[in-house]
């Protein structure tokens, strides 16, 4: 079965969507052939990856990023030429709209996967509840046209039901992790020396987009409180985004590594001591699994999907307010042996969340939704 996967995220980007779709391509079973259809600044035409290169326009509130409007007719022509039997809508941008148009034009069945809570992002970044509600109505309009909607967590599934989607058509496709790439063996003492961290001065890492919706403005206050309690540490941020300058001003001792490739990110994970992920808007949080695969205990917000990607009080802690963040972080910073044990538990947990297991629900939905082969 040939499946056309429409995404507004070309594979030059590193984020939760591209991580999941890369796994889909690499780990598809023999009876499923996923084909990626996207757009980017550079045209690419490979057997399983087509990127058209139309003009791009800045994304609202993400001015450094662009979205692209490819020719829908060209996409439909390629879908027909490639013998596609099923469409998979993954993002609600121009490529998502193209998927809807192609589905209507061809009559092909379509499934959708929900990755990003753009309604919550819009509220946080714009400060406008009216714009957020408009985004919510748009998302409902789009995903109601999918035969099945795949959510990355039970929390996201429930959120979609509360926002008006039919729960009978929503299934959970959990996220997985590449435990060969993300592994404790990548730990680099030389890198830790560059960071000027040690067991007595642990590295507290965050990996991901440095933007307001990730809850990162909680971290300066947390770091100050830890220092006030006599708990030395150093914040290490891997990633980039519009909040970087403000966060750097608020955390003058922190390290900002900028955008890194996946192998460099894997080394960062393994070379840190604790991972923090304060976002309460994420639907899954792949990085939480990646950090645990690298042997790190994790501190995660009590809201959103990431809390489902850990073992509470075993591989990490759930934090609901500033007091709980301080208590959890303090527990790990002052106790090297506790960090080690929880890091080992984190690695063991991640080994059970590998992509070959996590992708089974998706491929089963493909098989049910696709047309019979002729």
Image (spheres, rainbow, N blue to C red):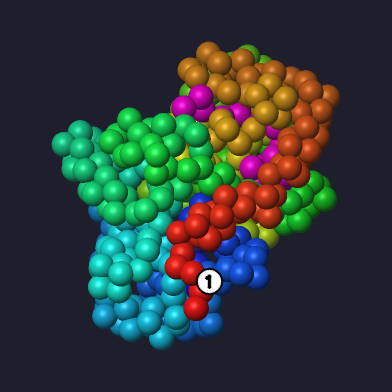
Where 263 sits versus 283, above or below? Answer: below
Taking depth in this image into account, of 86 and 15 the one nearest to the observer is 86
Where 306 sits versus 260, above or below? Answer: above
Residue at (20, 33) in percent of width and height:
129
Element on which disc 1 rests: loop
Residue stretch rendered in magenta on the structure = 289-304
Taking depth in this image into account, of 107 and 261 the one nearest to the observer is 107
Image coordinates of residue 192 in percent, x first then y, are 75, 45
Residue ID for mark 1: 1
Image coordinates of residue 98 in percent, x first then y, are 29, 68
Asked if residue 143 lies in the magenta stretch, the reply is: no
Image coordinates of residue 296 in percent, x first then y, are 71, 37
Residue 14 relative to residue 157: left or right: right
Taking depth in this image into account, of 110 and 141 the one nearest to the observer is 110
Residue at (61, 53) in percent of width and height:
359
Residue at (48, 17) in percent of width and height:
321
């Amino acid at each position: 079965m040939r499946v056309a996967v429409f995404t507004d995220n070309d594979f030059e980007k590193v984020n939760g969507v591209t991580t999941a779709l890369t796994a889909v391509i690499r780990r598809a079973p023999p009876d499923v052939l996923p084909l990626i259809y996207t757009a980017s600044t550079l045209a690419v035409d490979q057997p399983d990856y087509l990127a058209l290169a139309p003009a791009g326009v800045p994304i609202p509130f993400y001015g450094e990023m662009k979205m692209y409007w490819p020719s829908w007719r060209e996409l439909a022509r390629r879908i027909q030429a490639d013998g596609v039997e099923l469409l998979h809508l993954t993002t609600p941008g121009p490529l998502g709209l193209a998927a809807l148009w192609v589905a209507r034009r061809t009559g092909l069945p379509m499934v959708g996967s929900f990755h990003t809570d753009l309604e919550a992002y819009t509220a946080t970044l714009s400060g406008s509840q009216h714009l957020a509600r408009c985004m919510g109505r748009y998302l409902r309009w789009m995903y109601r046209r999918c035969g099945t909607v795949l959510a990355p967590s039970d929390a996201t599934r429930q959120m979609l039901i509360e926002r008006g989607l039919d729960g009978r058509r929503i299934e959970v496709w959990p996220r997985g992790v590449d435990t060969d790439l993300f592994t404790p063996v990548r730990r680099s003492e030389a890198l830790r020396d560059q960071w000027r961290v040690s067991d007595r001065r642990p590295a507290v890492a965050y990996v991901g987009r440095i933007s307001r919706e990730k809850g990162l403005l909680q971290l300066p206050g947390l770091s100050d409180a830890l220092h006030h309690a006599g708990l030395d540490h150093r914040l290490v941020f891997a990633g980039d985004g519009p909040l970087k300058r403000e966060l750097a001003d608020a955390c003058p001792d922190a390290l900002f590594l900028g955008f890194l490739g996946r192998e460099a990110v894997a080394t960062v994970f393994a070379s840190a001591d604790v991972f923090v992920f304060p976002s309460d808007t994420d639907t899954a949080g792949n990085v939480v699994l990646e950090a645990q695969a690298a042997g790190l205990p994790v501190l995660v917000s009590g809201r959103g999907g990431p809390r489902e990607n850990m073992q509470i009080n075993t591989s990490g802690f759930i934090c609901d307010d500033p007091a709980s963040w301080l208590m959890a972080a303090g527990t790990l910073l002052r106790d090297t042996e506790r960090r080690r044990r929880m890091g080992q538990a984190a690695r063991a947990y991640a080994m059970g969340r590998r992509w070959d297991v996590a992708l089974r629900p998706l491929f089963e939905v493909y098989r049910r939704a696709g047309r019979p082969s002729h």
